[in-house]
Image (spheres, helix red, strand yellow):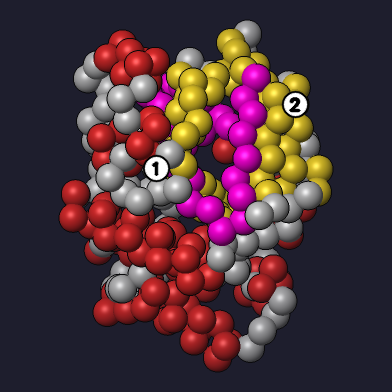
Amino acid sequence: MSAALKVNGLRKEVGGLVAVNEVSFEVAEGEFVGLIGPNGCGKSTTFNCISGLLDQTEGTVEVFGSDVSNQQPDQIQKLGLTRTFQHTRLWRQMTVIENLLVPPRKQMGDTLGESLRRLLAPYGNPSEEILLEKAYSTLEQLEVPHMAFNLASELSGGQSKLVDIGRSMMGDPRLLLLDEPVAGVAGPLAMKIFNNLRRIVDETGISVLIIEHNMDFILRQGVDRIIVMNEGEVLMIGTPEEVRGNRAVIEAYLGAAGDTGGEEE
Ligand SMILES: Nc1ncnc2c1ncn2[C@@H]1O[C@H](COP(=O)(O)OP(=O)(O)O)[C@@H](O)[C@H]1O
Ligand SMILES: [Mg+2]
């Protein structure tokens, strides 16, 4: 299998601090990979460098074979990469379906100030009907079509996360980067989100890299491999079986005791 994402020797200094150091890993096409580590270990910064929000200090990033190091987010998005953010930002006074029709901010190089047609340009200006159908089928894939006409402001934190994932899927990503999509989400819904992602990966062949900081949780969610980060560096990469019981991983997590529970939004 060829690589959807190749990160090589990534380093990012922020304000005199080394947030990410010598980080290298790959995500294959059709692979479901977890990126895990204690709070503050550099996971979101790694996503920011990959998706073009931050310029890295050193290292390279390749998306489907193209070197995207220090390119702009909208350039990288055109290659099929879409990401979500740790804190979901929905349009609260719009319905769920309307939220799905507005491309995620900070990725398309556009704002709501432009006409709707221009906003939808990243989707190739398909007809309204086709977009609506797509929004519905995305909600069906996530098993929440009944939420289509709820206002985003009425949703629970977990439901908002689901809609955010739905938005990220609207542009037909080939590589999806999700930043803590289940933080603060109740256990059963969090498991449902992971189950759905696993099914989507298996059915469509897209690649998903998902940040999570609860080790116990991710070990049981059926990801193919787990990248464990600690203090800005990759501690180990392996299958859930390999990660479970790895001495260095256990020590890193014991060192960050109390930091592995669910984070509230
Ligand atoms: N914009 C920033 N300015 C200063 N420090 C930052 C900034 N972004 C991240 N950091 C620091 O970089 C480290 C990694 O942060 P982050 O990538 O958000 O970690 P994680 O997502 O794993 O919780 C932390 O020590 C954090 O305080
Ligand atoms: Mg983070």
Residue 74 higher or lower than 119, as above or below: above
User: Mark 1 packing: few (<14 Cα in 10 Å), some, or many (20+)?
Assistant: many
Tell me, yes or no, whether the two marked residues, 1 and 2, touch with CB atoms within 8 Å.
no
Q: For ligand 2, tell me if the residue under mark 1 lies within 8 Å.
A: yes
Left or right: residue 246 versus residue 238 is left
The answer to if 11 sits in the magenta stretch is no
The residue identified by callout 1 is 180
Residue nearest the observer in this picture, 137 or 123:
137
Q: Residue at x 32, y 30 (%)?
A: 244
Q: Position of residue 128 (x, y in %)?
A: 58, 87
The residue identified by callout 2 is 59
Q: Position of residue 228 (x, y in %)?
A: 45, 28
Amino acid at pointer 1 = Glu
Left or right: residue 30 versus residue 73 is left
* Residue segment shown in magenta: 22-46
Residue 206 lies in what quarter of the image? bottom right
Amino acid at pointer 2 = Gly
Left or right: residue 102 versus residue 247 is right
Residue 33 appears in view: yes
Q: Residue at x 78, y 49 (%)?
A: 65
The answer to if 45 sits in the magenta stretch is yes
